[in-house]
Amino acid sequence: MAVPAGPASPPRQKSDAEIRAELTRKGHMAFSWDDLDKLELSNGIVTSLYRVGMPDEASSPTVFKVYYPPDCFVEAHTHECDYTEIVVEGSQRVGATWHHAGDIRIGLANRGYGPLVAGPEGATVLFFFADGRWPAITIGKNDGSTLGSDEIETHLNSRNQQFEARPHLHPTPDASPRTRRDPGL
Protein backbone atom coordinates (compact mmCIF):
# COMPACT_ATOMS: atom_id res chain seq x y z
CA MET A 1 0.00 0.00 0.00
CA ALA A 2 1.42 3.35 -1.02
CA VAL A 3 1.81 5.99 1.66
CA PRO A 4 0.41 9.35 0.58
CA ALA A 5 3.06 11.98 0.22
CA GLY A 6 3.03 14.83 2.69
CA PRO A 7 2.60 18.41 1.62
CA ALA A 8 5.27 19.42 -0.84
CA SER A 9 7.61 22.10 0.37
CA PRO A 10 7.69 25.18 -1.83
CA PRO A 11 10.50 25.17 -4.37
CA ARG A 12 13.61 27.09 -3.42
CA GLN A 13 14.72 29.58 -6.04
CA LYS A 14 18.19 28.83 -7.30
CA SER A 15 20.99 31.04 -6.08
CA ASP A 16 22.91 33.29 -8.45
CA ALA A 17 25.80 30.79 -8.41
CA GLU A 18 23.50 27.89 -9.33
CA ILE A 19 21.94 29.88 -12.16
CA ARG A 20 25.36 30.98 -13.42
CA ALA A 21 26.59 27.36 -13.39
CA GLU A 22 23.53 26.10 -15.29
CA LEU A 23 23.71 28.88 -17.88
CA THR A 24 27.45 28.34 -18.33
CA ARG A 25 26.96 24.59 -18.74
CA LYS A 26 23.84 24.57 -20.93
CA GLY A 27 23.61 28.06 -22.40
CA HIS A 28 19.92 28.36 -21.47
CA MET A 29 17.43 27.47 -18.77
CA ALA A 30 13.66 27.37 -18.35
CA PHE A 31 11.42 27.82 -15.33
CA SER A 32 8.06 29.26 -14.35
CA TRP A 33 7.01 32.06 -12.02
CA ASP A 34 6.06 29.28 -9.57
CA ASP A 35 9.75 28.30 -9.35
CA LEU A 36 10.74 31.75 -8.11
CA ASP A 37 10.67 33.02 -4.55
CA LYS A 38 7.55 35.02 -3.78
CA LEU A 39 8.52 37.76 -1.38
CA GLU A 40 5.72 39.49 0.51
CA LEU A 41 6.81 42.97 1.49
CA SER A 42 5.73 44.72 4.66
CA ASN A 43 3.19 46.79 2.69
CA GLY A 44 1.44 43.66 1.29
CA ILE A 45 3.06 43.76 -2.16
CA VAL A 46 4.09 40.31 -3.43
CA THR A 47 6.99 40.17 -5.87
CA SER A 48 9.15 37.68 -7.77
CA LEU A 49 12.12 38.46 -9.97
CA TYR A 50 14.80 37.02 -12.19
CA ARG A 51 17.71 38.36 -14.23
CA VAL A 52 18.12 37.99 -18.00
CA GLY A 53 21.60 36.60 -18.58
CA MET A 54 24.08 36.08 -15.79
CA PRO A 55 22.31 36.99 -12.54
CA ASP A 56 25.36 38.45 -10.85
CA GLU A 57 26.34 40.85 -13.66
CA ALA A 58 25.27 44.47 -13.23
CA SER A 59 24.47 44.74 -16.95
CA SER A 60 21.88 41.92 -16.88
CA PRO A 61 18.29 43.15 -17.25
CA THR A 62 15.96 42.47 -14.32
CA VAL A 63 12.34 41.27 -14.62
CA PHE A 64 9.80 41.60 -11.80
CA LYS A 65 6.26 40.30 -11.46
CA VAL A 66 4.55 42.42 -8.80
CA TYR A 67 1.12 42.07 -7.22
CA TYR A 68 -0.21 45.22 -5.54
CA PRO A 69 -3.14 44.54 -3.18
CA PRO A 70 -6.28 46.69 -3.53
CA ASP A 71 -5.68 50.39 -2.81
CA CYS A 72 -1.96 49.78 -2.11
CA PHE A 73 0.03 53.04 -2.08
CA VAL A 74 3.66 53.38 -3.19
CA GLU A 75 5.31 56.79 -2.92
CA ALA A 76 6.74 58.66 -5.91
CA HIS A 77 10.23 57.48 -6.81
CA THR A 78 12.69 56.87 -9.64
CA HIS A 79 15.22 54.23 -10.79
CA GLU A 80 18.82 54.50 -12.00
CA CYS A 81 18.05 52.68 -15.25
CA ASP A 82 15.43 52.75 -17.99
CA TYR A 83 12.47 50.41 -17.55
CA THR A 84 9.12 49.42 -18.95
CA GLU A 85 6.07 47.97 -17.27
CA ILE A 86 2.98 46.13 -18.45
CA VAL A 87 -0.22 45.99 -16.42
CA VAL A 88 -1.25 42.32 -16.62
CA GLU A 89 -4.35 42.36 -14.39
CA GLY A 90 -6.32 45.00 -12.53
CA SER A 91 -5.61 48.71 -12.58
CA GLN A 92 -3.13 51.16 -11.13
CA ARG A 93 -2.98 54.92 -10.94
CA VAL A 94 0.42 56.47 -11.63
CA GLY A 95 0.33 60.13 -10.66
CA ALA A 96 -3.05 61.28 -12.00
CA THR A 97 -3.39 58.68 -14.79
CA TRP A 98 -5.12 55.29 -14.49
CA HIS A 99 -3.62 52.29 -16.30
CA HIS A 100 -5.48 49.03 -16.95
CA ALA A 101 -4.68 45.48 -18.09
CA GLY A 102 -2.75 45.65 -21.35
CA ASP A 103 -1.41 49.17 -20.79
CA ILE A 104 2.34 49.71 -21.17
CA ARG A 105 4.49 52.43 -19.62
CA ILE A 106 8.11 53.26 -20.47
CA GLY A 107 10.27 55.24 -18.07
CA LEU A 108 13.70 56.78 -18.39
CA ALA A 109 16.34 56.56 -15.71
CA ASN A 110 16.30 59.20 -13.00
CA ARG A 111 12.91 60.60 -14.01
CA GLY A 112 10.49 60.53 -11.12
CA TYR A 113 6.95 59.17 -11.27
CA GLY A 114 4.11 58.37 -8.93
CA PRO A 115 2.73 57.97 -6.48
CA LEU A 116 1.29 54.57 -7.43
CA VAL A 117 -2.12 53.48 -6.14
CA ALA A 118 -3.55 50.06 -6.98
CA GLY A 119 -7.18 49.95 -8.07
CA PRO A 120 -9.94 48.39 -5.96
CA GLU A 121 -9.20 44.97 -7.50
CA GLY A 122 -5.42 45.27 -7.02
CA ALA A 123 -2.93 45.13 -9.87
CA THR A 124 -0.40 42.67 -11.28
CA VAL A 125 2.39 44.35 -13.21
CA LEU A 126 5.46 43.05 -15.09
CA PHE A 127 8.52 45.32 -14.89
CA PHE A 128 11.54 45.05 -17.17
CA PHE A 129 14.58 47.02 -15.98
CA ALA A 130 17.41 47.61 -18.46
CA ASP A 131 20.01 46.35 -15.99
CA GLY A 132 20.57 45.61 -12.31
CA ARG A 133 20.04 49.17 -11.10
CA TRP A 134 16.34 48.58 -10.36
CA PRO A 135 16.19 49.58 -6.67
CA ALA A 136 13.77 52.46 -6.22
CA ILE A 137 15.19 55.82 -5.20
CA THR A 138 13.17 58.24 -3.12
CA ILE A 139 12.36 61.67 -4.48
CA GLY A 140 11.11 64.79 -2.79
CA LYS A 141 10.16 64.46 0.86
CA ASN A 142 9.36 60.75 0.63
CA ASP A 143 11.06 58.49 3.16
CA GLY A 144 11.21 55.23 1.14
CA SER A 145 9.02 53.34 3.59
CA THR A 146 6.60 52.14 0.87
CA LEU A 147 9.20 51.17 -1.75
CA GLY A 148 10.39 47.76 -0.46
CA SER A 149 13.76 47.86 -2.26
CA ASP A 150 15.68 47.23 0.97
CA GLU A 151 13.48 44.21 1.78
CA ILE A 152 14.05 42.74 -1.70
CA GLU A 153 17.83 43.29 -1.58
CA THR A 154 18.01 41.75 1.92
CA HIS A 155 16.12 38.69 0.68
CA LEU A 156 18.38 38.28 -2.36
CA ASN A 157 21.54 38.62 -0.27
CA SER A 158 20.20 36.13 2.28
CA ARG A 159 19.30 33.58 -0.42
CA ASN A 160 22.77 33.78 -1.93
CA GLN A 161 24.50 33.63 1.49
CA GLN A 162 22.48 30.53 2.44
CA PHE A 163 23.73 28.87 -0.73
CA GLU A 164 27.33 29.85 0.00
CA ALA A 165 27.02 28.35 3.50
CA ARG A 166 26.19 24.92 2.00
CA PRO A 167 29.44 23.81 0.32
CA HIS A 168 27.98 20.47 -0.82
CA LEU A 169 25.56 22.36 -3.06
CA HIS A 170 28.18 24.34 -4.96
CA PRO A 171 28.02 23.41 -8.62
CA THR A 172 31.24 22.13 -10.09
CA PRO A 173 32.23 23.41 -13.50
CA ASP A 174 32.04 20.91 -16.32
CA ALA A 175 35.67 20.18 -17.17
CA SER A 176 34.91 18.53 -20.49
CA PRO A 177 35.22 20.81 -23.49
CA ARG A 178 32.07 21.41 -25.50
CA THR A 179 32.30 21.12 -29.24
CA ARG A 180 29.68 21.62 -31.90
CA ARG A 181 29.15 18.73 -34.24
CA ASP A 182 29.61 19.57 -37.84
CA PRO A 183 26.51 18.28 -39.65
CA GLY A 184 28.73 17.51 -42.63
CA LEU A 185 30.69 14.86 -40.74
Image (tube, rainbow, N blue to C red):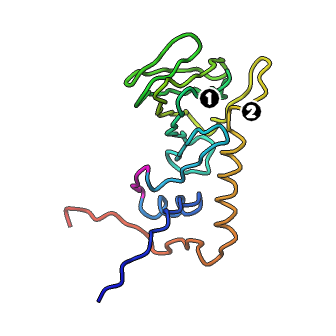
Q: Nearer the viewer, residue 143 or 111?
A: 143
Nearer mark to the viewer, of 2 and 1: 2
Mark 2: few/some/many CA within 10 Å (<14, 14-19, 20+): few
Q: Mark 1 belongs to which amino acid? A: Cys
Q: Which residue is mark 2?
A: 145
Q: Is residue 31 above or below residue 108?
A: below
Say which residue appears at 50% left-offset and 26% top-offset: 84
The residue shown at (46%, 33%) is: 124
In the displayed structure, does residue 114 sit left or right of residue 30?
right
Q: Is residue 110 left or right of residue 36?
A: right
Q: Quadrant of the N terminus?
A: bottom left
User: How many callouts does the rendering have?
Assistant: 2
Instruction: Find disc 1 in the rendering and name its residue.
Output: 81
- Asked if residue 60 lies left or right of residue 124, the reply is right
The residue nearer to you, when weighing 107 against 172, is 107
In magenta, the rendered stretch is 27-33
Which residue type carries mark 2?
Ser
**Element type at mark 1:** loop
Graded by Cα atoms within 10 Å as few (under 14), some (14 to 19) or many (20 or more), the crowding at tag 1 reads some
